[in-house]
Image: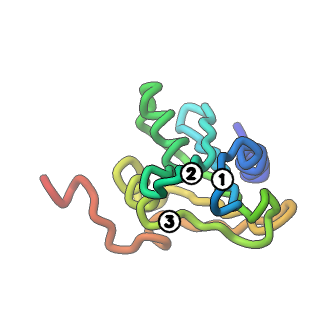
Amino acid sequence: MMNEKELCSKAVEAMGKAYAPYSKHKVGAALLTESGKIFTGCNIENAAYSPTVCAERVAFFTAVAAGERNFKSIAVAGGKDGIIGGAFPPCGVCRQVMAEFCSPDFIILVVTGNNSFKKYTLSELLPEAFTPKNIE
């Protein structure tokens, strides 16, 4: 099974595929499923801005499109010009997507530098989340 540092490394690798000509901030994500599969994503910007998609959502949507529904953890790495200069935690929209598919104890690894990361649970980053249970 993949360890946390390896998952973070996959997120850093995914940063290299980002399309970020406007902000110059490249972000990569590596999503680990309960079955051990990894789905990566990168941010993809658009001149109109609102069609821009974050790396985390690309990873989740690719996994869901492949039939996956059970997730263990995600690693996220980002930085201006593809250079990690601190934490790039998931935005609110990405946190909400995570709440749709993941339990409150879902692990989020935020890469902070070379071989370093911070570890959070989804409930720490999105307390009192609006989930499918709210509309049952």
Q: Residue 118 location, x and y as percent? A: 69, 69
Q: Earlier in the sequence, mark 1 or mark 3?
A: 1
Q: Which residue of the protein is positioned furthest toward the right in this rendering?
A: 114
Gap in angstroms between the C-alphas marked 1 and 2: 5 Å
Res. 106 in view: yes
Nearer to us in this view, 68 or 95? 95
Provide the residue designation for mark 1: 20
Residue 45 tag number: 2
Front disc: 1 or 3: 1
Task: Tell me the element at label 2.
Answer: loop
Give the residue displayed 45% in from the left and 38% down from the top: 61
* Labels 1 and 2 touching (C-beta < 8 A): yes
Residue 50 image-quadrant placement: bottom left
Residue 109 tag number: none
Res. 3 in view: no
Give the amino acid at mark 3. Answer: Cys
Give the amino acid at mark 2. Answer: Glu
Give the residue displayed 71% in from the left and 43% down from the top: 14
